[in-house]
Amino acid sequence: MIPASFEYVRPSTVEEAAQILRNAAGDDVKLLAGGQSLLPLLRLRLAYPAALIDLGRIDELRGVRDEADHVFIAAMTTHDEVVKSAVVQEQCPLVALATAQVADPAVRHRGTFGGSMAHADPAGDLPAVALALDMEFTILSAEGTRTLPASEFFVDYLETALGPGEILLGAKVPKLGAGWGFHYEKFHRTAQAWAIVGVAAAVKRENGTISEGRVALTNMGSTPVRAFSVERRLPGVPVADGNGELREAASTAANDTEPPTDLHARPDYRRHLAVVLTERAVRKAAA
Amino acid sequence: MSRITVTVDGTKYEEEVEPRLLLVHFLRDRLGRTGTPIGCDTSNCGACTVLMDGRSVKSCSVLAVQADGSDILTIEGLAEHGTLHPMQRAFHEEHALQCGYCTPGMILASIDLIQDNPDPSEDEIRSGLEGNLCRCTGYSNIVRAVRKGAQEMGATP
Ligand SMILES: Cc1cc2nc3c(=O)[nH]c(=O)nc-3n(C[C@H](O)[C@H](O)[C@H](O)COP(=O)(O)OP(=O)(O)OC[C@H]3O[C@@H](n4cnc5c(N)ncnc54)[C@H](O)[C@@H]3O)c2cc1C
Ligand code: FES
Ligand code: FES
């Protein structure tokens, strides 16, 4: 279908975009990033913004920067650029692993890192990675720049802590030191589809055992969730787990989750998947 | 209305467009380039795939105003002086189509894949084309065609 009419503006700096956004206070104005979630919504007439502010030509919103103890990924960096970034591959490989599983190549050429976070679809692959890695979001608001940990950014289904006049500038991804291994395990019905359940895992290995683990779940609630009960049980589990200790730890993955019901799965099936996929994800991360 | 300048298959166009006009409708309805089909309303099928500044995009999921200043290659711009592009020829020779609806998108997505990976394995072809659906062929001949097209593209750059 053809979207309903809207005004279109294409600022060339973040400051200009922020100004337009603030002046529009009250009107239904939307930021347009890669458009890979927003344009399908407009085409299905599920959204009727009065105006779109296209962030697509703002150079300062693109790129990956290697900064001492973290990597900064700017909001408008495309999924394809993230996957191909040598800095991301070396310093925060979990981001590259999960982003490579987002949608399909054509969508990854347009869709952006920041758009995925701001859209906050609980089935999206990157929000769980943000939680698992304790990313910190950088946000431009009327008062200046503020930062927010991932644990406070995802508020509800398709809802973030971003206020109406705010623009997501990017995220700081802490560099984890030596000994860490990563995996993103995604279960979906067809190749390009969204995750029915996904698991992001980061584990630190010392002397043949797991000393620390981080696990976050995709599509097990209205926001991505950290599987803290699994994380508590991981330290001490041998990397070459022979006695089922890992399975034991993973069995608690669905504790404290409220998985949704949809066309693909009911909550009980999702709970089952979360347990199985957590075991796989941690095993592969530790390997 | 917004004024945009877009190069499509080597020809430069300057047009006034409504912001809501999708790139695929611009190509089909405004420029008459109906070689790029529309297969869905959900950005899933990939039938509308074109190359925008050299990379595959779903032209139903890009606004014409977003394409301002860019270079678009559609299936209609692939053949040169009546000679098929090696990937087009491979699809033809390997019977990689039945109804042909998915074919323009498949060919452009394949060319995009070859740019990153000049000699893809069967698995790499299958995942490289995951955004393009075919309801007829069962994909086997498409995969074979892409391998052949890749080899020929390597031989005739
Ligand atoms: C066929 C298909 C399959 C897909 N499969 C997957 C999948 O498997 N996994 C997955 O994770 N995603 C998937 N996606 C979604 C894809 O990852 C999108 O790229 C992403 O969700 C949105 O990014 P975008 O840049 O396109 O944002 P847009 O669609 O442009 O914007 C999305 C929302 O975020 C807001 N926004 C964007 N940027 C900012 C910013 N900087 N500051 C504040 N607000 C902002 C917009 O206003 C809008 O509300 C799929 C999409 C398609 C079409
Ligand atoms: S028409 Fe189906 S993806 Fe564009
Ligand atoms: S040949 Fe008919 S859809 Fe592919």
Image (cartoon, coloured by chain):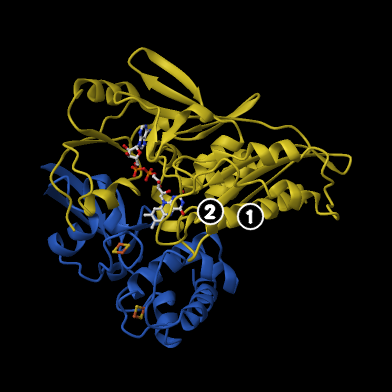
| Image colour assigned to chain B | blue
Near mark 1 (Cα within 10 A), the count class, few <14, some 14-19 or many ≥20, is: many
Identity of the residue drawn at 36% across and 52% down? B53
* Coordinates of residue A246 in the picture (x, y in percent): 77, 49
Quadrant hosting ligand 2: bottom left
Earlier in the chain: of badge 1 and badge 2, it is 2
- Based on the displayed image, in which of its 4 quarters is residue A32 positioned? top left
Q: Tell me which residue sits at (44%, 50%) in the image.
A: A260
Q: In the rendered image, which residue does mark 1 sit on? A: A277
- Chain identifier of the yellow chain: A
A82, above or below A192, in the image = above
In the image, taking residue A50 as reference, residue A113 lies left or right, namely: right
Residue B110 to residue A101: above or below: below
Of all chains, the one bearing label 1 is A
Q: Position of residue B54 (x, y in %)?
A: 40, 56
Q: Is mark 2 within 8 Å of ligand 1?
A: no
* Mark 2, secondary structure of its residue: strand
Mark on residue B46? none
Q: Which mark is residue A197?
A: 2
Q: Amino acid at mark 1?
A: Leu
Q: Give the number of marks.
A: 2
Label 1 residue SS:
helix
User: What amino acid type is highlighted by mark number 2?
Assistant: Val
User: Residue B48: x, y in percent?
Assistant: 30, 64
Instruction: Name the residue nearer the viewer: B56 or A282.
Output: A282
Asked if residue B79 lies left or right of residue B31, the reply is right
Q: Are marks 1 and 2 in contact (CB under 8 Å)?
A: yes
Residues behind callouts 1 and 2 on a single chain: yes
Distance, label 1 to label 2, CA atoms, is: 8 Å
